[in-house]
Amino acid sequence: MAYKPLIIKSDFDAYCRMSKNIKDSDLDIHIRDTQEVEFESWVSNEFYTDLMDNLATKPQLTALFNEYIKPFLVLGSYYRFLLWHGANVSQYGIRQNNEDTSVEVTDKRRAELMGDVQSKKNAYLNKLKDKLFNDNFTYDSVQYNFYDTYDKRELMQEQNIRQLGQRKLIKKGRGFCGYPKDCW
């Protein structure tokens, strides 16, 4: 499927601060990464196709997009933007630009900003997942099947955890259960 951005620079104004001087091209790579790597990887192909091509004809899906998906995509893109903005890859490694008219943000402050954006992004992702589940993945009379026989969640590697004082392992991943008494 050909890439088409679901969000643009003007969508950022409602969720985060960004200078009008930032070029669209500086954001485009971060929008694409968030959309294709973070979002497309866990939604069904049919759902993603409807978002890309049929959003105008699906009012319920449009409402879901505007209230839940757009904030997630904007904040995910903004997070990536904060990480890379001002850093340039050269033959000498990753370099930070300096100007006489401004002072660059410290690594500590950048980490604080990124942590704030990440927590907001995660909140919107959790709201989106709850909304999808509560609506039974059904919008505009189409039930989207996110987890069919090829379950994307099963791609997680299984991890075993041993609680202190317990002899049995708790499996995390497929079939994860929180307490040993619920597992066996």
Image (cartoon, rainbow, N blue to C red):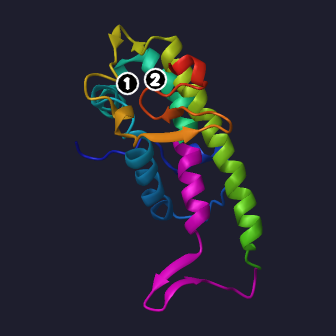
Q: Residue furthest left?
A: 1
Query: Of circles 1 and 2, which is in front?
Result: 2
Answer with left or right where residue 77 lies relative to residue 137: right
Q: Quadrant of residue 138?
A: top left
Q: Which residue is mark 1?
A: 56
Out of 136 and 71, give the one closest to the viewer. 136
Q: What residue is rendered at 40% in x and 52% in y? A: 32
Q: Amino acid at mark 1?
A: Ala
Q: Residue furthest bottom?
A: 92
Out of 43 and 154, give the one closest to the viewer. 154
Q: Quadrant of residue 46?
A: top left
Q: Is residue 76 magenta?
A: yes
Secondary structure of residue under mark 1: helix
Answer with left or right where residue 153 lies relative to residue 103: left
Q: What residue is rendered at 43% in x and 20% in y? A: 61
CA neighbours of label 2 inside 10 A, class few (<14), some (14 to 19), many (20+): some
Quick check: marks 1 and 2 in contact, CB under 8 Å? Answer: yes
Q: What is the x, y in percent for residue 62?
A: 46, 23
Out of 50 and 170, give the one closest to the viewer. 170
From this view, report whether residue 63 is shown above or below residue 30. above
Quadrant of the frame with the N terminus:
top left
From this view, report whether residue 95 is shown above or below residue 27. below
Q: Amino acid at mark 2?
A: Thr
Q: Tell me, yes or no, if residue 135 can be seen here.
A: yes
Answer with left or right where residue 47 lies relative to residue 23: left
Q: Which residues are magenta?
A: 73-102
Q: What residue is rendered at 54% in x and 31% in y? A: 168
Q: Which residue is mark 2?
A: 62
Answer with left or right where residue 59 lies relative to residue 17: left
Whole-number angstrom distance, CA of label 1 to CA of label 2: 7 Å
Out of 176 and 1, give the one closest to the viewer. 176
